[in-house]
Amino acid sequence: VITDVMVNNGELVEKGQPLFAIDASSYQLKVAQAKAELRQARESDSAIWQQLAAAKQTQSQREFEYHNAKQKLARNQKLRNKGLATEQELDDAITNTQVASSAVEAANAEVKRIEAELSTQDRTAAIELAEAKLASAELDLSHTQIVAQTEGVVTNLQLQSGSYITQGTASLMLVDEAHAWISADFNEKGIDKLTNGREVLVSFDALPGKVFTGEISSQERAIYDTNNANGQLSSVTNDTRWIREQQKVRTRITVNELDPSMISGSRASVIVESGNPIMDVIGSAWIHLVTMFRYIY
């Protein structure tokens, strides 16, 4: 739901200027939830560190008990050799030593388990996941205020407070008049002349009597097959005409000193200079004739 519209139709806006805002309530709740989950992850991480400290204390205690058991076993073995200790006492000392050794191994395993859970980094995976979730929620919240990504003019504005928009759909048109170009389609037989930097003459339908100069800035290097949209086997259509219609090659043309009154979507006639003096004179005469003809048609 749109809560505020900050621009008017036809207004020139700067890059970074707020355009409109949407209801941020649900996004604020997601940020609060993510912060709570991060605190929970940090508290859990702190508890695990405390468990590690306790496990290491237990490990030291078990090692001390094992050391005492080995010393007691050594004494009983000496006493038994002198006949001062019974066989039962020696067996008990051996059993106690084995039990103490097993306890040390168990304590070591517990320490390694906790260390693996904590990882070798300062933050656990749970904390990193919670931080990433919080960053994503904060990013979504920041997007509740839509700002202009470039300088331009607002056009065809249909938004108003209370309107409902759907995620991923176009909501506002912003025309970047500082970066304008022409998409011109030529027959493929002239593809050797459609090179970058080649000079062209342009006549706009909206500006009769004026011929502009420009140059080819780029050329598309592939043709989209409308009958083969999914990249499957081509659908071949037999052409019964004696001479088949030529393929079109799209080029992008930049115009020098473009008239600021032009609007996006204006139509134009374009001729490319071939480098042949005679043909270029004929082409220039033709484009001037076209632009004069626009006065009456």
Image (cartoon, rainbow, N blue to C red):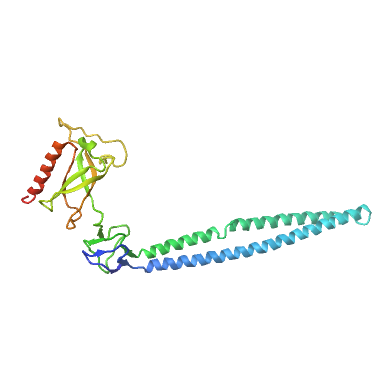
Measured as percent of width and height from the top left, residue 16 is found at: 32, 63
* Labels in figure, total: 0
Measured as percent of width and height from the top left, residue 198 is found at: 23, 42
Instruction: Identify the residue shown where x is 21% and y is 47%.
Output: 214
Quadrant in the rendering for residue 165: bottom left
Mark yes or no: residue 129 visible: yes
Question: Position of 281 compared to 191: left or right?
Answer: left
Q: Quadrant of the N terminus?
A: bottom left
Instruction: Identify the residue shown where x is 84% and y is 58%.
Output: 72
Task: Look at the picture and state if 184 lies above or below 107.
Answer: above
Q: Looking at the picture, tell me which residue is in the foreground, 21 or 55.
A: 21
Measured as percent of width and height from the top left, residue 280 is found at: 15, 39
View extreme (left): residue: 296
Question: Position of 62 compared to 198: left or right?
Answer: right
Quadrant in the rendering for residue 122: bottom right
Instruction: Identify the residue shown where x is 71% and y is 62%.
Output: 58
Question: Position of 175 compared to 243: left or right?
Answer: right
View extreme (top): residue: 242
Measured as percent of width and height from the top left, residue 93 is found at: 83, 56
Mark yes or no: residue 92 visible: no
Question: Position of 191 compared to 206: left or right?
Answer: right
